[in-house]
Amino acid sequence: VPIIKYIRKNRELFLQLVNSLSIDQLNKIPEGFHNNFAWNFGHIVVSPQNLCYLRSGVKPDIDIPFKTKYQKDSKPASFITQEEIDDLKLQLVSTINTIEEDVKNNLFKNITAYATTTYGYVMTTIEEILTCTLAHDSLHYGYAFAQRKLVN
């Protein structure tokens, strides 16, 4: 699946940023922002699973770790520990690998059409969902990149 290589690259860049900051820097909410670097990182781990499985109706009962904590319209409610960051790092890779495998196995052949509030575009195919995932991940990478400059 060609677009997944771009999603992976974006995640590699995000991970480099995560690894360049202390746990205190990851948790600091810069002035003018409603969330922190760690939240943006958790959000890009959780969101593609929501998009690909829950919102599409493909696996409506899937258990997504940290879903409530990092879903849309949530915000950091407490200090995000190094242990949680490490768990999110593992999920960053494993979840996209699972999605790629499910695409190859044609799991997404019957998708319930839906649109995200961020882009408002109705998606009916896994290719459209993955394109949205790349755009969404890139948006949050941009926020995190800006936040990095403010927490250093």
Image: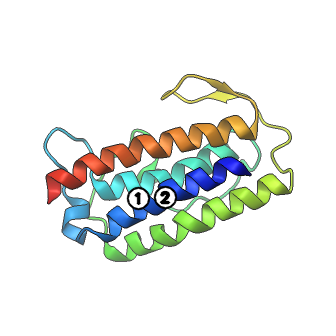
Disc 2 from disc 1: Cα separation: 5 Å
Observer able to see residue 55 = no
Camera-side residue of 127 and 71: 127
Residue 108 screen position, x and y as percent: 80, 45
Residue under the point 62% across and 55% down: 5
Amino acid under disc 2: Arg
Q: Is residue 46 left or right of residue 34?
A: right
Camera-side residue of 119 and 46: 119
Amino acid under disc 1: Phe
Residue under the point 30% across and 55% down: 37
Q: Secondary structure at mark 2?
A: helix
Mark 1 and mark 2 in contact (Cβ < 8 Å)? yes
Q: Quadrant of residue 148?
A: bottom left
| Image label count | 2
Q: Is residue 38 left or right of residue 57?
A: left
Within 10 Å of disc 1 (Cα), the crowding (few <14, some 14-19, many 20+) is: many
Q: Secondary structure at mark 1?
A: helix
Residue 39 screen position, x and y as percent: 35, 54
Observer able to see residue 41 = yes
- Residue 53 — which label? none
Q: Which residue, given by chain and number where applicable, does mark 2 sit on?
A: 11
- Residue 14 — which label? 1
Residue under the point 75% across and 30% down: 124
Where 119 sits versus 6, above or below? above
Residue 131 screen position, x and y as percent: 62, 38
Camera-side residue of 10 and 48: 10
Within 10 Å of disc 2 (Cα), the crowding (few <14, some 14-19, many 20+) is: many
Residue under the point 79% across and 36% down: 111
Quadrant holding the C terminus: bottom left
Asked which colour scheme the image uses, the reply is rainbow
Where 88 sits versus 106, above or below? below
Q: Is residue 118 left or right of residue 149?
A: right
